[in-house]
Image: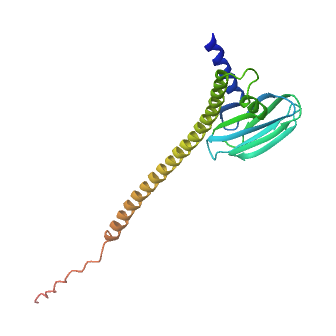
Amino acid sequence: MFMLQLSIFLSCIVHNLAYQLTFELEDRQMRCFFKTLTKDTAYFIDIQVVSGGNYDVDFTLFDPMRKIIDHRQRSSYETVQFNSTVDGDFKLCFSNVFSSVTHKVVFFAWYNEREVDSAYAEKPGPDTLFLSTVHNIAVHLSKITNTQVRERMLNSLSFNFGAQLNSRVFYWSLGQSILIILVGIGQVFVLRSLFSVPTARYSAQKPLILGSR
């Protein structure tokens, strides 16, 4: 029972620090996500295009009254910071309608400064060595979780960029190799055509023998 309470306590602290999601956005598609926010609270959102095309998407942030808070086009990495003025469901929409071929993989995370500060702050109650140790473990676990998520996202971005670059270099090299082979074959045929033109031939004329009468 004690271990169950401890695990719930740790998971709640880690979970409250950020809401993170990685999703796939198809070509010519728009996807929206909702989150209930509280009034007079500072929030910021990290957005990163992990893979696909030119690593860019459009995104728009709406308040509960459908008023646009922020709108950016063809963004690869952005950090949006805003203060919520009302309570309600805020909507964050991502758009890939400008792309007709490639799909994108997008990562975003909501952060609440108040929740981060409260999670890292000391809890009220008797300051025992055990509770202090548990709180320190929870804080470090939350930091490790956020760092790992960020590192996985950056590693995925680097891997996808390297794989895309490798694919482009491979097909470019393949095209150049085929072009060199075709040019070599063309040169052979051109040289053969130069020596296949018939030349004038001269033959010695035989002397005419006049018959006697």
The answer, for residue 101, to whether it is visible in the render is no
> In terms of depth relative to the viewer, which is nearer, 212 or 72?
72
Compared across the picture, whether 85 is left or right of 49 comes to right
Coloration mode? rainbow
Expressed as whole percent of the image width and height from the top left, the position of residue 19 reads 71, 30
> In terms of depth relative to the viewer, which is nearer, 122 or 189?
122
Quadrant position of residue 119: top right
Task: Count the numbered circles shown.
Answer: 0
Q: Quadrant of the C terminus?
A: bottom left
Quadrant position of residue 82: top right
Residue shown at 87%/33% (left/top)? 40
Residue shown at 64%/45% (left/top)? 55
Compared across the picture, whether 213 is left or right of 74 comes to left
Expressed as whole percent of the image width and height from the top left, the position of residue 10 reads 65, 22
Expressed as whole percent of the image width and height from the top left, the position of residue 43 reads 79, 36
The answer, for residue 105, to whether it is visible in the render is yes
Residue 162 position (above or below residue 4):
below
Residue shown at 35%/63% (left/top)? 188
Residue 181 position (above or below residue 110):
below
Residue 42 position (above or below residue 166):
above
Quadrant position of residue 129: top right
Q: Quadrant of the N terminus?
A: top right
> In terms of depth relative to the viewer, which is nearer, 180 or 26?
26
Residue shown at 68%/20% (left/top)? 9
Residue positioned most to the top: 1
